[in-house]
Amino acid sequence: MEDLEAVKAMIQRELSGIRDLEERRAFRDMMEGVFLSLWETNADMYQKLQERVIGEIAWDMNRFCVCTGLVEKENLDPVHPWLAPVWEEDTKKTSYQAKELRQIIREKGKARLATVFVQCGPGEVKSLLGHAESCSGRLKAGEEYPVPVFLEPAQRYLDQMEHLYHLFMKNGIPWRTVNAPCFFKMVDVCIRQIPDTIPDQQEITDFGMDFGAFNGQVRFGMIPVWNVRRLELESMGFPVPCRDHESYEHTISVAAYGEQNAYLVEEKAGIQNVSQRGNRLYITGSAANEKRWNVYMICREQDSRVDRFPVPLFQNRRTDRFSERYSRQMGQPVRTRAELERFIRGLGLEDYIQYQDCALTGERGERQDTYPVNVFLRDEIRGKGGRQKLTLYFKPVGKERWLLLDLASYIAAEVQELYPEYECGGRLV
C-alpha cells in the first residue's frame, strides 16, 4: 500500500467480488467510515514525523547568525526591531551619593565609574591598559576632586558571549565564532577610593578623565548591541508524556515574536532536546512541572533606512553557496590551499582584509599578531605542545585600520575550528 490510490484499487477489487448487495453496502460503509479514515490519519502522522526528522537534519547555516555593533547611548532605540543591548544595565542612568560609592568600594574593592570604547587596534588597547597610571580622573560633587583611577577590560561583554556559547551547546546547535571586535575594545574606568573631603550625602554629578595620548581614541557613552534578546515564556497547555514513559514534551508559542527568528532555551535540569517547528518550540526532557522558560531569541536582520551606527555592524554569516552547504553536509574538510581560501572568502570580509596566503611553521615559528577570540574554548584532548603554527597572511583593504587585526583574529578563530591540529593565527602584510 504505497499510496491512497493503491488502497482504493484494493477496495474496489474486494467490492467487485461481493455479490450480495447488503454485504457490499456494509463493506463499503466500513471501508469509508473506518478503514480509509484510519489509513489517512496514519499517513498524516507519518508525514508529520517525516517532516520533523527532515527538519532536525536539514540545517540553515545562517539561521543562528549573530550580529554585533555599537550605538550611542542617546540614540539607543528600546523598541528596535532586531538589536538590543548586550548588557541591559548599560541603559540605566546611574547616579550615586558619596556614601553609596564608599559602600560599593568596601564590598567589591572597587567601583566602576564609566565604560569607554577605545577606537584603536588591539596593541594600542593593551598599551592603554598597561599604562593606566598616566591617566587621571576627577569627580564633580559640588566641586571637582581629583581621584586616582585604574583601567580594566569590560569582561561582562565577553562573559555574555561565553553564555551564548553554552546556550548553543545545550540546545545542540553547532557553535560559530561571534564576530564582535567592539567587545574587546570596551574598557572599565574604576576607582578604589574617593576623597574623604566629599560628604556622604553629596551626590556625584559628573566624572571626567584625561587619557593622555589616547584622548582622541576614547569615546564615552557607547553601548555594545547585538541581535539577541532574552524572553520569559510560558508553556502551552499540559506537557505531553513521551513513549519512553520518562520524558515530557512541552510546547511554547513564539507566534508573537515571529517564526523567522531562531530560539535557544536556557538550560534546566533534564532538558534533552529543543526544536522549532513553525511558530512553536518543543522542549523534551524529564521536567514534568515546568511552566516558565527563559528563551533567547536571535532576531533575523531587517533592512532599515533610519538606522545609523558609529562603527560598522559585523556578523558571523557565511556566504550561502552550494559549495558551502555541500562541505558542511559532508563534514570532512579538504586539506588544500584552495579549500582554505574558499572557506575564508565565504566569511564575507573582503571589503576590509583580503586573504593572501598561508604558511606552516614550527612550534617556535614566526610571530602571529592576532589574539584568541574564543577564549572560553579549551582543547582538552590535544595539548599545545608540539603543534605547528598555521599563519594566515592578510592584505589591508578597508579604511578602518584599527579594526583589521580584530577581523583577522575572527577569521583565525574560524580556521582554528576547521584545523584543530594546528595553532592558527594571522598577520597583516
Image (cartoon, helix red, strand yellow):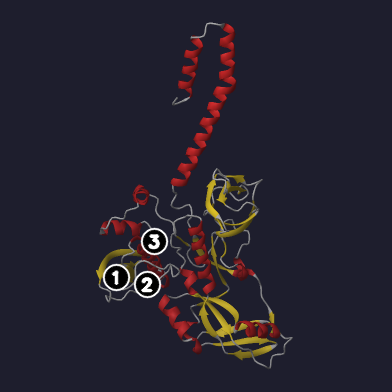
**Disc 1 designates what residue?**
387
Query: Within 10 angstroms of label 1, few (less than 14), some, or many (20 or more) residues?
Result: some
Q: Amino acid at mark 2?
A: Thr
The one nearer the camera, 383 or 255, is 383
Which quadrant would the N terminus be assigned to in this image? top left
Q: Residue at x 56, y 27 (%)?
A: 38
Q: In the picture shown, does residue 303 fall above or below 383?
A: above
Q: Amino acid at mark 3?
A: Leu
Q: Nearer the viewer, mark 1 or mark 2?
A: 1
Confirm whether residue 183 shows in the render. Answer: yes
Q: Nearer the viewer, mark 3 or mark 1?
A: 1
Residue 426 position in % (x across, y down): 33, 70
Residue 147 is left or right of residue 174, and the answer is right
Q: Earlier in the sequence, mark 2 or mark 3?
A: 3
Q: Nearer the viewer, mark 2 or mark 3?
A: 2
Q: In the picture shown, does residue 31 fall above or below 161?
A: above
Q: In the picture shown, does residue 48 fall above or below 191?
A: above
Residue 380 position in % (x across, y down): 39, 67
Q: Amino acid at mark 1?
A: Arg
- How far apart are the two marked residues, 3 and 1, measured between alpha carbons? 28 Å
Label at residue 349: 3
**Disc 2 designates what residue?**
370
Residue 345 position in % (x across, y down): 34, 58
Residue 300 is left or right of residue 145, and the answer is left
Q: Residue at x 36, y 56 (%)?
A: 346
CB atoms at circles 2 and 3 under 8 Å apart? no
Element type at mark 3:
loop
Q: Earlier in the sequence, mark 3 or mark 1?
A: 3
Element type at mark 1:
loop
Confirm whether residue 263 shows in the render. Answer: no
Q: Residue at x 56, y 44 (%)?
A: 242
- How far apart are the two marked residues, 1 and 2, measured between alpha carbons? 17 Å
